[in-house]
């Protein structure tokens, strides 16, 4: 697979199809692969592919300094490419402007990361080309029950315990905004926390400010989060932001049969409505 | 409730009214709380909140938008004619676009009208002539609206003038061309196939303009590119143009009235998705099973039979006629859920007209309910039954078959509780009213909403019945909902009145409490564009003086924004700001409660 | 903090739309329909404006319950603002639930300009229910930890 990936990279650069290939490079063994930006065909050998390729590289597509490099190709896993589909829906990318090199993925890390355990996208579906063999026989795709298993378990806790849990967790948040930086879908030019008239979210790392930030970050991804879990992986305080993302993803899936980034044709669920939306909670 | 009053008072006193806010300590405090201490404490907090807000108010000026005092009326049926005449008579220019060769619409083809039995053409054609001769009405027939750009006050409309093959400025309407035309056997659209017309034709004698059109599919010369040309040779005015082509013209308008009317439900099996049709009625299969508009032509004095009632198959006078109402209406299973509103009345009229023509004939009407609300309407139906002897049977028709030159109509009379079989010579089906073809595309062009049946949505069902949510676009007639002639005319005058109110202002004045977008920070996700109920937000580009693209951004059109603030809530980075309800104001109010 | 011998008086913040619920509250006044004085009404043009951050901010300022109210479906002055709001609330509530925020503290209601009585009843019920729940200690703790 690696050789094929490198060949693809060389070909795309030589043909002038793209000016930069965003891929994974070798870091210290055992540590997550680092992003590399290949701009010359002869550098293609820097690319690697292994079970440490966690990063969702599509997050780099929004960066002005990456955009300045020219037309990109990006190496994606089945989970990563969903972000590109969302970005296209939100007018942030034009499909022809990004070349997606899809990698068949058996799961990252050993044992596989949480998202990999419930993965149903081992083979990318929207990539321009796919490298690797689809597993044969194809594994049974997990259903919603598996996707939201941890959330369901968490929701078994009484409400007071859930609150106590988050008070403990969010107390550790230092407002470093790593969760925002790694998110491929956090592309605002000025984040709401930077708006100071009024200050909607306390910018210092107080517990109230951290709650407001956690709620805001998650809700801004309602119906949009592609589920790459990079926010959770990047959090230096080890806060399980995945649970919050999942609570919103579950509404989208259960109420609207919608999973962000899986179907380029599907109508978004936020910024839309149905006359008969559920309203049993409204008096 | 009283904010407007106090703002007006401030304005009269020479202050900017938008600097006034109200602390509602009467209706929402002293009048509803009896605990004096608690009410006073609340009043203090409400005042504190309001002070926090009003400190952040801005002096605002009403937004002025220039206006082209010229109306575009789309559709030249009775509604469009009425609207155009009202506006033109009030002194404003009108552009009237009609896609058929003549104005007149459905009403021009009707025989007589309920409940007075006026001859339809007698009352309509003088109005048509008025339109044709009005100095302030510019008439485009055989034309369609191709594109609409711009917004209230300033629409730019592209109109497709379809190739007519006749120069209407040179043509005198003398009729030599259609007299000599050898291509005779073409089904007349105006007669709904009940009669024939030439390849070069005017749809009916009183057409406005009285200028013919050549049907390129029927004309031997246009089909083969050579030969015939008799009309050209005969035309003394030299008006025939075999090389004519579609042309696009542009017109400016400040307001648009949509009056595109209706078509009939397609009764046969050939249906669009979701509609089953009534194949069992044999429409399209038996010549003597016809729809209501076809019957109108058969009993019309100007119709293909000269007003003599002859059935289509053999020209015989039908001795027994069955009228079936609610064909397609009020039928969730096969047709449409709604009531078409006019069928009860015109079916009574049909039965009456038939009995006036064939005194010893039998008129049977199958109905579900009789809905005859309206001035002199129920009396009219009673007259059909009691004086003119129409036989009404409450029940549905299940099947129509042709047997030995007769139509066997099987149905039920549920009041008598008996199955009925009638041998009929002619069957008339009261097909449901549906919006005219192409109205959805037009609605999308104009940003007007429509319901699941394709009828255009008024802005408010009671209080804004001719306005739409697209500012400057109005609706009237059957494109909005099934309705009869008096209602369509009333609505047309209402729409025309609204347009006059707008035009008489000279310029548009809009409330200044609207949204604007911080374009520097907009990330151009355009979610606001999707949610705006007024399509007031557009995708815009910021370019350098040299024209290079700096960034894309959402932008509010102040001529369209109504100030709901839905954009504020959906924007993740809070780039929209709603004047009068800025985030700064609202959050200050909340924080004053700490 | 309420003293032990005084009944607890909850603080309730209501975000209401200008065209339906605000006028419904006015009607309650015109009809002299009494209700507890615990509610503070903040008027917005439309429920479409009401952002979830406002609700959080209300809790940060010590609200014990929040009411969000606007026009009934189909009645929105701006046609669709309430539909968009309702869709957002469908997502917002499960998120808060996951965080352990008490959904009994957040109320949604459709109250029309004609429903002065419904406004009175809604506010009365919410006030009484919140009295029974007591002060929203959890959010107060969050705020106090931030001081």
Image (cartoon, coloured by chain):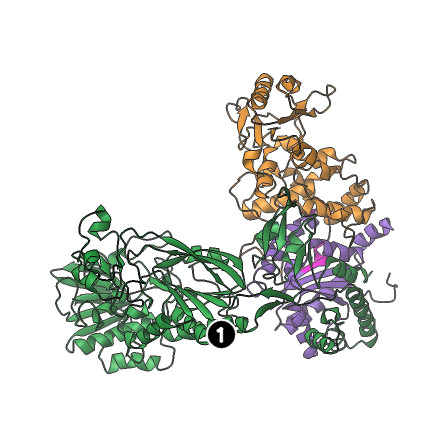
Indicate the colour of chain B.
green
Q: Residues within 10 Å of mark 1 (few under 14, many from 20)?
A: some
Indicate the colour of chain C.
purple
Q: Is residue C90 visible?
A: no
| Badge 1 element | helix
- In the rendered image, residue A131, in percent from the top left (x then y), is placed at 55, 23
Chain of the residue where label 1 is placed in the rendered structure? B
Magenta residues span: C98-107
Q: In which quarter of the image is the N terminus of chain A?
A: top right
- In the rendered image, residue B579, in percent from the top left (x then y), is placed at 70, 62
Residue that mark 1 sits on? B497
How many tags in the picture? 1
- In the rendered image, residue B76, in percent from the top left (x then y), is placed at 37, 66
The chain assigned the colour orange in the figure is A
Q: Is residue C104 inside the magenta stretch?
A: yes
Q: In which quarter of the image is the C terminus of chain A?
A: bottom right
Is B309 situated left or right of A178 in this image?
A: left
Q: Quarter-wise, where is residue A245 in the image?
A: top right
Q: Which residue is drawn at 75% across and 35% down?
A: A235
Of residues B552 and B345, the one drawn nearer to the viewer in this rendering: B552
- In the rendered image, residue B206, in percent from the top left (x then y), is placed at 27, 70
Q: Is residue B276 above or below residue B382?
A: above
Q: Is residue A267 inside the magenta stretch?
A: no
Q: In this view, does C112 lie above or below B181?
A: below
């Amino acid at each position: 697979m690696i050789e094929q990936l490198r060949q693809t990279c060389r070909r795309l650069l030589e043909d002038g199809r793209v000016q930069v290939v965003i891929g994974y490079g070798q870091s210290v063994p055992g540590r997550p692969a680092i992003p590399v930006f290949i701009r010359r065909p002869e550098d293609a050998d820097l690319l690697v592919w292994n079970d440490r390729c966690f990063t969702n590289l599509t997050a780099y597509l929004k960066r002005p300094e990456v955009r300045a490099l020219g037309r990109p190709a990006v190496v994606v896993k089945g989970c990563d490419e969903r972000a590109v589909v969302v970005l296209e829906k939100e007018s942030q990318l034009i499909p022809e402007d990004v070349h997606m090199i899809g990698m068949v993925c058996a799961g990252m890390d050993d044992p596989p990361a949480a998202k990999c355990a419930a993965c149903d996208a081992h083979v990318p579906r929207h990539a321009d080309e796919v490298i690797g063999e689809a597993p044969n026989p194809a594994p049974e795709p997990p259903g919603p029950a598996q996707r939201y298993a941890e959330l369901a378990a968490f929701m078994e806790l009484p409400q007071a315990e859930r609150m106590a849990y988050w008070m403990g967790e969010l107390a550790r948040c230092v407002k470093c905004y790593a969760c925002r930086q790694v998110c491929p879908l956090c592309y605002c030019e000025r984040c709401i926390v930077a708006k100071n008239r009024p200050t909607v979210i306390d910018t210092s790392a107080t517990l109230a400010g951290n709650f407001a930030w956690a709620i805001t970050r998650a809700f801004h991804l309602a119906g949009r989060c592609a589920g790459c879990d990079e926010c959770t992986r990047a959090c230096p305080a080890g806060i399980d932001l995945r649970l919050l993302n999942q609570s919103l993803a579950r509404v989208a899936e259960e109420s609207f049969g919608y999973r962000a980034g899986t179907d380029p044709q599907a109508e978004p669920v936020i910024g839309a409505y149905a006359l008969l939306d559920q309203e049993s909670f409204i008096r | 409730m009283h904010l407007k009053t106090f703002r007006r008072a401030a304005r009269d006193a020479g202050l900017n009214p938008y600097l006034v806010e109200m602390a509602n300590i009467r209706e929402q405090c002293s009048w509803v709380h009896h605990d004096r201490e608690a009410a006073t404490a609340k009043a203090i907090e409400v005042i504190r909140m309001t002070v926090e807000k009003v400190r952040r108010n801005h002096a605002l000026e009403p937004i002025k938008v220039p206006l082209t005092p010229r109306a575009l009326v789309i559709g030249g049926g009775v509604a469009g004619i009425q609207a155009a005449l009202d506006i033109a008579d009030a002194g404003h220019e009108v552009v009237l676009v009609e896609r058929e060769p003549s104005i007149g619409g459905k009403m021009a083809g009707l025989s007589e009208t309920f409940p007075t039995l006026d001859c339809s053409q007698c009352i309509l054609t003088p109005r048509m002539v008025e339109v044709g001769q009005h100095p302030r009405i510019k008439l485009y027939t055989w034309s369609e609206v191709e594109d609409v750009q711009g917004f209230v006050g300033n629409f730019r409309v592209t109109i497709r003038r379809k190739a007519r093959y006749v120069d209407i400025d040179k043509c005198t309407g003398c009729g030599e061309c259609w007299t000599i035309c050898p291509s005779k056997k073409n089904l007349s659209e105006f007669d709904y196939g009940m009669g024939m017309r030439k390849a070069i034709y005017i749809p009916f004698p009183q057409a406005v303009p009285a200028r013919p059109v050549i049907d390129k599919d029927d004309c031997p010369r246009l089909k083969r590119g050579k030969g015939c040309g008799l009309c050209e040779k005969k035309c003394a005015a030299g008006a025939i143009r075999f090389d004519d082509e579609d042309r696009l013209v542009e017109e400016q308008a400040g307001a648009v009235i949509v009056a595109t009317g209706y078509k009939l439900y397609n009764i046969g099996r050939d249906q669009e998705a979701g509609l089953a049709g009534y194949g069992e009625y044999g429409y399209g299969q038996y010549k003597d099973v016809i729809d209501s508009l076809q019957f109108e032509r058969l009993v019309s004095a100007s119709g293909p039979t000269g007003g003599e009632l002859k059935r289509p198959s053999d020209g015989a006078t039908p001795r027994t006629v069955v009228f079936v109402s609610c064909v397609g209406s009020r039928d969730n299973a096969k047709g449409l859920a709604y009531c078409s509103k006019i069928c009860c009345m015109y079916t009574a009229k049909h039965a009456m007209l038939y009995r006036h023509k064939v005194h010893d004939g039998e008129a049977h009407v199958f109905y579900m309910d009789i809905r005859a609300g309206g001035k002199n309407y129920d009396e009219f139906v009673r007259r059909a039954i009691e004086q003119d002897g129409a036989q009404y049977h409450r029940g549905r028709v299940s099947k129509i078959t042709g047997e030995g030159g007769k139509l066997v109509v099987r149905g039920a009379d549920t009041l008598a509780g008996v199955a009925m079989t009638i041998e009929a010579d002619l069957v008339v089906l009261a097909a449901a009213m549906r919006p005219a073809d192409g109205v959805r595309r037009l609605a999308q062009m104009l940003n007007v909403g429509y319901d699941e049946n394709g009828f255009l949505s008024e802005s408010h069902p009671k209080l804004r019945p001719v306005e739409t949510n697209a500012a400057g676009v109005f609706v009237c007639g059957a494109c909005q909902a099934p309705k009869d002639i008096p209602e369509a005319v009333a609505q047309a005058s209402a729409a025309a009145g609204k347009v006059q109110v707008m035009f008489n202002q000279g310029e548009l004045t809009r409330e200044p409490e609207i949204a604007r977008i911080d374009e520097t920070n907009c990330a151009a996700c355009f979610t606001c564009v999707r949610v705006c109920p007024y399509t007031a937000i557009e995708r815009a580009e910021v370019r350098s003086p040299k024209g290079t693209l700096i960034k894309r951004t959402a932008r509010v059109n102040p001529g369209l924004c109504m100030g709901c603030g839905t954009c504020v809530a959906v924007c993740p980075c809070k780039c929209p700001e709603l004047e009068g309800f800025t985030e700064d104001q609202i959050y200050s109010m909340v924080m004053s409660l700490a | 903090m309420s003293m032990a011998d005084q009944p607890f008086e909850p603080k309730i913040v209501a975000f209401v739309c200008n065209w339906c619920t605000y006028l419904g509250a006015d009607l309650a006044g015109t009809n002299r329909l009494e209700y507890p004085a615990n509610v503070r009404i903040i008027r917005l043009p439309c429920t479409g404006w009401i952002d979830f951050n406002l609700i959080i901010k209300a809790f940060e300022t010590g609200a014990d319950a929040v009411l969000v109210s606007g026009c009934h479906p189909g009645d929105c002055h701006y046609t669709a603002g309430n539909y968009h709001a309702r869709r957002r609330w469908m997502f917002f509530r499960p998120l808060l639930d996951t965080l352990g925020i008490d959904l009994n503290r957040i109320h949604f209601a459709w109250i029309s300009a004609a429903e002065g009585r419904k406004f009175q009843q809604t506010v009365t019920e919410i006030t009484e229910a919140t009295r029974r729940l007591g002060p929203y200690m959890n959010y107060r703790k969050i705020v106090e930890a931030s001081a």
